[in-house]
Image (tube, helix red, strand yellow):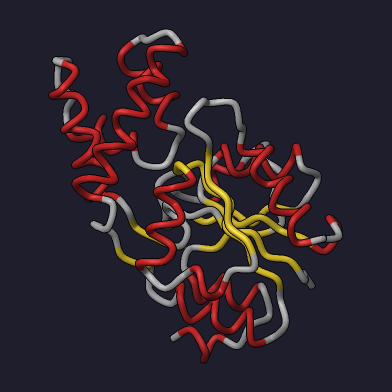
Amino acid sequence: MYKNILFDLDGTLLDTTIGVIEAVKITIEQLGLTMPPAETLSTFVGPPMQSSFMKHFGMEPERALECANMFRANYKKYSLFSAEPYPGALELLKSLKETGHKVAVATYKSHENAMGILEKFGISKYCDFAMGSDLEGRLTKTDIVNECIKQLGADRTATVLIGDSSADSRGAYEADIDFIALTYGFGFKSAADLQNIPHVAVCSNIEELADYLSVSPEKVC
């Protein structure tokens, strides 16, 4: 069905909860801000970090970007590799490559940190291209998705983005490609969260995703 498969990273291929929250807490302490409760800290995992600082601390965009970059430095230094692939994720990537698909990762994690974690967990070897965000806060998810499409030389009608959040769905919509929503990550929790959000499928685990992509489920068990 699709020849070109774009993946989000956090909440899609990797569970990065522990590492992200650890770096967020370190950053908040360094800034001398009041530490939010655990349930609020958990919402920092997934969305653009700049947006989270604006939302939870009422920061202006410029200050929020500074704090987001402080987080990225702490994340790289202290907890970048405190993560784990979701069950079946690496097997799915391997199967996609073996069946002739082009694969890319489009993430809002900073590009440097994204490349490091993709290499660490053996994801990069299955990717034809991968791109993260810039430190200046100029790139949107749509920009990153469009660059992946360009680098793959992909036909948009044969391309899909897979992700777990409204930012991913918006990136796919604005890039004029299909979107597959995942409910096991940090954003969407059920099909009910997808009302009024364009999508072609909802998957609650990697096996369902493999089945939808027509990759043999046996290969990802």
* Residue 102 against residue 22 in the figure, above or below: below
User: In the picture, residue 109 is in which quadrant?
Assistant: top left
Going by the picture, which residue comes out furthest to the bottom?
218
**Residue sitting at x 54%, y 53%:** 8
* Residue 58 against residue 12 in the figure, above or below: above
Residue 79 lies left or right of residue 103; in this view the side is left
**Residue sitting at x 18%, y 34%:** 38
Report the quarter where the N terminus lies: bottom right
Residue 139 x/y as whole percent: 61, 32
* Residue 173 against residue 37 in the figure, above or below: below
User: In the picture, residue 20 is in which quadrant?
Assistant: top left
Residue 209 x/y as whole percent: 57, 70
Residue 196 x/y as whole percent: 67, 36
Residue 58 x/y as whole percent: 36, 9
Residue 27 lies left or right of residue 135; in this view the side is left
Report the quarter where the C terminus lies: bottom left
**Residue sitting at x 28%, y 38%:** 42
Residue 71 lies left or right of residue 197; in this view the side is left
Residue 60 lies left or right of residue 25; in this view the side is right
Q: How many marks?
A: 0
* Residue 26 against residue 192 in the figure, above or below: above
**Residue sitting at x 38%, y 59%:** 117
